[in-house]
Amino acid sequence: MYYHPMDFRGNIGPKKKTSYILDFKEGDVNGNGFIDCVYLIGDKPYGDESPFRDNIRLKIVDGKTNLITIIKLKENAGYNPTLFLGDFSGDKVDDILISIDSGGSGGYAFYYIYSFLRNKPKIIFDFENFNKDYLYEVNYKDDYKVEVISKSTNTKYILDITYKGESYLSEIYYENGKLKEPIKGWINPLGGLYPIDYQRDGTYELYALQRIAGRYNADGLGYVQTSLKWNGQTFVDFFQTVGVYGEEFE
């Protein structure tokens, strides 16, 4: 990613921090009919080549008045911070999607969607609320099956893990397919959030991904895939599936 230094003056030495433009988009985000400039700005130590950025904040420049608004983010440090402008609420005005990778081993990320209608910032999607609302159970079952229970949608999914192979299965199953002991997995926090215009009507919905972990974090079993739409007050799910890994065959 290209980083443009905003101001190097006075930043001498590795411990000084410099602000950079991390991403930039143009669109009418306040609804006044003029194109606004939207920036993600973040800091890094001067001379440090690490892709990690902190103090990430949103900067909006009103295209009509040049009024500048700075919005501080609750989770404001990570990797590959990006912007997407699109109408998520159906009011024909662009909203602002912010995505920041955590860099953690779980592959989770931080996501916010802001409405800036009439120059009033309002969070309409917060990844932390999503993670609190979408809860699951992951239970290993007899006969090489794993049960995923989505409490939010009151849905149960059954995964066939025979593709894991004899070495993996023999550690946790007897030869007759019975579990040697109870095993629980888990669902990682939100790791992907993608805008998709499912209806092709100019209003974006959201496609959310959460990784299913088995006995340990690297033991991936698949993904919970949740599609969300704005109902006038919040984002609600309208479709949920589980995607599983395929098995090579000859």
Image (cartoon, rainbow, N blue to C red):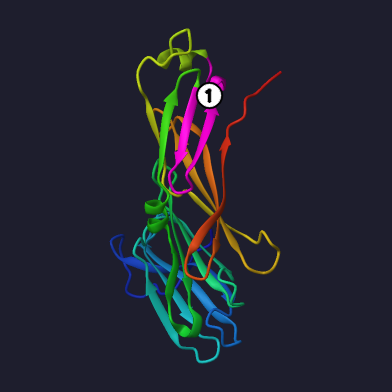
Amino acid on which disc 1 is placed: Ile
Q: Which residue is mark 1?
A: 161
User: Which of the two residues, 66 or 236, is positioned nearer the viewer here?
Assistant: 236
Q: Is 165 located above or below residue 60 in the figure? A: above
Residue 16: % across, % down: 30, 65
Q: Residue 151 sits in which quadrant? A: top left
Q: Residue at x 53, y 17 (%)?
A: 165
Residue 246: % across, % down: 62, 29
Q: Is 146 located above or below residue 41 in the figure? A: above
Given the current orientation, which residue lies at the most extreme left position? 15
User: Which of the two residues, 111 or 234, is positioned nearer the viewer here?
Assistant: 234
Q: Which residues are magenta?
A: 145-165
Q: Residue at x 69, y 68 (%)?
A: 201
Secondary element at tag 1: loop
Left or right placement of residue 217 versus residue 246 in this view: left
* Magenta-colored stretch includes residue 150: yes
Residue 131: % across, % down: 40, 52
* Magenta-colored stretch includes residue 131: no
Residue 216 in view here: no
Q: Is 224 located above or below residue 60 in the figure? A: above
Q: Residue at x 45, y 88 (%)?
A: 67
Residue 184 in view here: yes
Mark 1 Cα shell of 10 Å, populated few (<14), some (14-19), many (≥20): some
Q: Residue at x 33, y 66 (%)?
A: 17
